[in-house]
Image (spheres, rainbow, N blue to C red):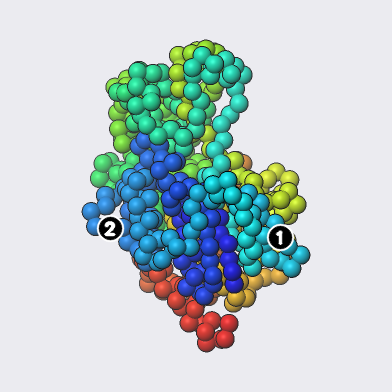
Amino acid sequence: MKIGIVGAGFAGLSSAKVLTEFGHDVHIFEKDSEVGGVWATSRRYPGLGTQNVRSTYALSDYPYPKGTPEWPSGEQVQKYMEGYAKKFNILSKISFNTEVTIAKQNSDGTWSVETLAGGKKETHTFDFFIVANGIFSDPFIPEWKGADAFKAAGGKILHTVDFHNVEDVRGKNAVFVGYGKSSCDAANATVGIAKKTTVIARHLIWKVPKRLNNVLNYKMLLLTRMGEALFPYIELKGAEAFLHGKGKKVSAGMLGSVQGVIEKQFKLEKLGLHPKTGLDTIVRSTVSLATDGFFKNIKEGKLSVMRDTEIVSMSAGKVTLSNGQSLDADYVICGTGFHQRVPFLEDSVMKAITDERGNFRLYRQLIPLDVKNIAFNGYNSSFFSQLNAEMGAVWIAAYIAKAINLPTKAEMLAHIDKRLAWMEKRTENKHARGTNIIPFSVHNIDELLLDLDLQIPAPVRFNQWLLPINPKSYAKIGSKLRKRMAKSGK
């Protein structure tokens, strides 16, 4: 098939590589000048690095270069992705600086994709279309009363993805909105450069140290099957049924112990930064890895966090908070999330793939059931986003070849309904329009491989209960599927 892909992040690159191996003619459109997605130069904020250790944040058949630190920087991840694209001859399949403006489905099921590059419009036709622009591609910035007056006086309002140089805030009052990783990473990077750095946190979430008690790598806690099993999945089976049934005291005790370590290590009560919830609430949104030195800088008064409040209005050189306080501000930098929308798809298509609240209704986080010849890859925010996307690409290859036995449409619709209801309940409606699968990344991969009847060996799965997931364990999934398809004539 001739397959068009939007986006050259992890999902787009792995889709191109996998589907090429399955014999398809693939082409990627990327509006940036380089591969990388959120890791591209144009989107990197100061202090950006991975939440995962290097060994778990890799594609299955391409390790990081020797000498890469355990927590790679944003630049190192982009270079890694560039190396992947070169090794597997993907670069020649990418049109850079090319924006997809409209993607329409034709009456025969093919897709007409209109692009814009250097002022020139072109139309391309594909048999199958993959949306891999990611759920972090369309920055959201709140609208505040008085924002125009703030900007007219020289104030700057921007998203973290548009904040690239700490020198911009030298000698300025920098206010960061949000308590997620991006806000805290970027705020921490401005300490000693900005006149004053303040983080405005409407809600505090738990921050996890890279090393618990400065010794145990957090990968041993949360990047294992046991780590996932501490939180109740949509369906409880085997050991997980025990951990959330008769063995609930065991899982609660383990989480409680970890919580105690974090409270003590970061001195959360003393700093007034305890979230006032249990660690189990990380299942509601995401784990945020603590920025190196973040709490130390707070303790030393170099950085301040205003908790349980938000900006309600702005004026020249000032922001006013909901708690009544007013802060001097020259820069307001927002780590406030992203819109979940696909601007190049027609309204009729979006209505067919989303519900009335904008939740993506995708089976296995990959395919809509009422629109043909289209898949969404990378629409599943996870701990192992690159591996979930790679295995998603293998699943899509099988789906295109009709080499997968799917349930009836009614059963798949019921599954989507059940999953969305569960996601909404467990995340208190913070599930990024149905795309957040954290912390159940491995469960998602298991489901895809179960559909393909290509589970990794039982001894490997057993080891994953206590050891971090190693992407190398999944390197042969695609080749096994191709061999099976060749035997069956598909």
Q: Give the quadrant of the C terminus.
A: bottom right
Q: Which one is in front, 148 or 323?
A: 148
Furthest residue to the left?
Answer: 67
Name the quarter where the N terminus is drawn.
bottom right
Q: CA distance from mark 1 to mark 2?
A: 41 Å
Q: Going by the image, does 122 lie left or right of 239? A: right
Quick one: label 2, few (<14), some, or many (20+) residues within 10 Å?
few
Tell me the element at label 1.
Answer: strand
In-image side of 152 versus 175 (left or right): right
Image position of 81 with respect to 182: above or below? below
Q: Residue at (54%, 16%) from the top-left corner?
A: 152
The x, y position of residue 228, in whole percent, is 46, 54
Instruction: Give the residue displayed 30% in from the left and 23% down from the top.
Output: 192
**The quarter of the displayed image where residue 126 is located:** bottom right
Q: Earlier in the sequence, mark 1 or mark 2?
A: 2
Tell me what residue is drawn at x 45 percent, y 22 percent: 331
User: x%, y% of residue 428?
Assistant: 60, 40
Question: Disc 1 marks which residue?
Answer: 105
* Front residue of this view, candidates 227 and 37: 37
**Kind of residue at disc 2:** Pro
Does residue 471 appear to the left or right of 205 in the view shown?
left
Residue at left offset 43%, top offset 37%: 182
Residue 402 image point, x, y percent:
62, 76
In screen coordinates, is 95 left or right of 71?
right
Q: Residue 249: x and y, percent?
A: 45, 49
Residue at numbered disc 2: 65
SS at badge 2:
loop
250, 489: nearer the viewer = 489
